[in-house]
Image (spheres, helix red, strand yellow):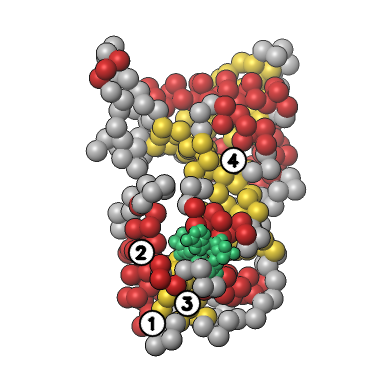
Amino acid sequence: MEARIVPFGRQHIPAAAALLAETGKGRGLDTADPVVACQRIQEWATRQPAGFAALDGVSGRLLGFMAVSPPGGRKARVRLDQHATVGGDVGHQVRCALYAALSGQLVGDGVLVHDANVLAGDEGAVASFARLGFGIDQVKGFRPAAPAVWDPRVRRALPEDIPRLVELAEEVQEFHAGPPMWRPPEPGASQMVELGYRRAIEDGPAGLHLLVVAEIPGGRLAGLMQAAPDGRFTGAVTIDLAGVTQRFRSTGVGTALLNAVTDWSAGLGFARCGAGWTSANPVSDRFWRSRGLVPQAYRMSRVIDRWPPGGAADSGPAVLDRDGSPP
Ligand SMILES: CC(C)(COP(=O)(O)OP(=O)(O)OC[C@H]1O[C@@H](n2cnc3c(N)ncnc32)[C@H](O)[C@@H]1OP(=O)(O)O)[C@@H](O)C(=O)NCCC(=O)NCCS
């Protein structure tokens, strides 16, 4: 197979949408619908992405595409709707050729942290990115939504809970900053968390945001879960924040909160509910998987330690912070 790699252009959109829809089929992704696939590609294609198409050298047929939206800073992400290829070994060769072109442009522009969102069921893509040096950083998994009895410790959050919930969110962040995740807190994350809380609380019982808390004897809050409809997976709710204070972990609080989310999701007519988690998190990886969540997508990540041009081998690799910026 001889593939020709060319810059991605509007003329590639119809064939790219067909490939993307094919990849999402049977995997619960919104882009399994070819109309949605086309809309998504049109959206990012208008924002001057860095992107390439692979064309069959003989027939000119589109064999795959890969793109990133214009990166801010030193990090770029190939989102789920920004790559698809034909299947099989040709697919692997095409992904490698597309990533060679894309990474050439990115590294040339000083973008050294590369992420790719990949469907867990798209085993060819997972294997290709792994062979290209990417590792699984984040996991998103779901389980069926179903009615469940709420544990007496669990209730919806109230506005007066917010200060304690921010404390709990900060504890979750601190936990992620330690080994083996080493994920430093995002600047402004506490404010984001507070905003999310307010949305869930103001939304009220009929709304599409849920914030549940677990009380321990004495009325102190020991845990929380915050959930909302997933942006990409159809019929699914995703928990975007979950935490139980250290002293009360492994006492069934997390399971009780998850049951409330599962029940709420089913009540709203969602088929599945789930969460995203850091793959290296030894506690939550075990928790979500043992509570029936099955991985549906991964964020795979690669950091390039680029030697300075012409630099000596002992000058050391580039050191970047979490956002891929030099410290
Ligand atoms: C993940 C978390 C929310 C689970 O809540 P929890 O109240 O501990 O959960 P439960 O008591 O209902 O269930 C315990 C399960 O959690 C996991 N778990 C809890 N503590 C653990 C620990 N110290 N080591 C390994 N697994 C642990 C296990 O799967 C355990 O199941 P098991 O008892 O059958 O072995 C909680 O441990 C937590 O807040 N962890 C730190 C922050 C975090 O990782 N948040 C999730 C971000 S995605």
Residue depth check, mark 2 versus mark 4: number of the one nearer the observer:
2
Q: What residue is disc 3 on?
A: 213
Q: What residue is disc 1 on?
A: 220
In the picture, the quarter occupied by the C terminus is top left
Are the residues tagged 2 and 4 within 8 Å (C-beta)? no
User: Is 48 placed left or right of 308 in the picture?
Assistant: right
Residue 204 image label: none
Q: Earlier in the sequence, mark 4 or mark 3?
A: 4
Q: Earlier in the sequence, mark 1 or mark 2?
A: 2
- C-alpha distance separating marks 2 and 4: 29 Å
Q: What residue is disc 4 on?
A: 118
* Residue type highlighted by circle 3: Val
Q: Residue at x 38, y 82 (%)?
A: 220
Residue depth check, mark 3 versus mark 2: number of the one nearer the observer:
2
Q: Residue at x 47, y 68 (%)?
A: 249
Q: Earlier in the sequence, mark 1 or mark 4?
A: 4
